Image (cartoon, rainbow, N blue to C red):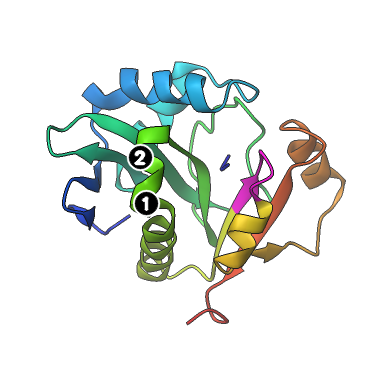
Amino acid sequence: MTSANSDTNANTNAGVMWRAMLQRDLPAVVAIAEQVHPAYPESPEVFAERLQLFAEGCRVAVDGEDCVHGYAITHPAMLGQPPALNSLLHVLPPQADCLYLHDVALTDAARRYGLGGKLVELIRQHAEAMQVGHAALVAVNDSAGYWRRRGFTDYRQADAALLKKIASYDVAAHYLVMDLARTV
């Protein structure tokens, strides 16, 4: 749900950066999710499972004092098959063909640092390193325009199962895809 630099830190500003999410960050991640996405509740177990299954796709936005101001969670997925809201994955698909942006949330204090634009570049780099052809997300909170301006487009092959999953977010949600071959 949306409204990684390979391994270490990706500076976006002298005082704010994306870094790898750690287990100790989960309480802050859950608190930010509750603050930023109150209409899209997910249990703490969902965040913990994503970190356990695919730590390399989990990032937090921190200031110079390592205070968490946001997070982004990605994981391998199958194109056109996003998870329903507040659902556990249990396992990652062995034949994944896209990197799915499960969720990104930033506090008001972090929004002025350009973290979203940097995140798109990190997603692109990570997906290419994984050798998958696409990145995908479900845009909520009227954010589809933001993601479209950054290279994501509407998925044109939606079936009944996909439409049902998207509806688990809300009627205004959009499943968007970035074709990495077209955005290079």
Q: Position of residue 109 (x, y in %)?
A: 35, 35
Residue 141 picture location, percent across and down: 66, 38
Cα–Cα gap, marks 1 and 2: 8 Å
Residue at 54% in and 27% down = 88
Q: Is residue 130 left or right of residue 14?
A: right
Q: Amino acid at mark 1?
A: Leu
Q: Can residue 93 be seen in this snapshot?
A: no
**Residue nearest the observer in this picture, 179 or 93:** 179
At 44% across and 47% down in the image, what residue appears? Answer: 74
What is the span of residues highlighted in magenta in the rendered image? 137-143
Q: Position of 17 compared to 150: left or right?
A: left
Q: Residue at x 63, y 38 (%)?
A: 83
Extreme residue toward the left, this view? 65
Residue underneath mark 2: 110
Q: Nearer the viewer, residue 19 or 136?
A: 19
Circle 1: is it few (<14), some (14-19), or many (20+) Cα within 10 Å?
many
Disc 2 crowd rating (10 Å Cα; few below 14, some 14-19, many 20+) is some
Identify whether 181 is placed above or below 116: below
On screen, residue 159 above or below 61 = below
Residue positioned 24% across, 43% down in the render: 20
Q: Is residue 65 visible?
A: yes
Sequence order check, earlier mark of 1 and 2: 2
Residue at the spot of label 1: 115
Given residues 106 and 50, the one toward you in this image is 106
In this rendering, would 175 be left or right of 116?
right
- Residue 160 appears in which quarter of the rendering? top right
Judged from the image, the secondary structure of the residue bearing numbered disc 1 is helix
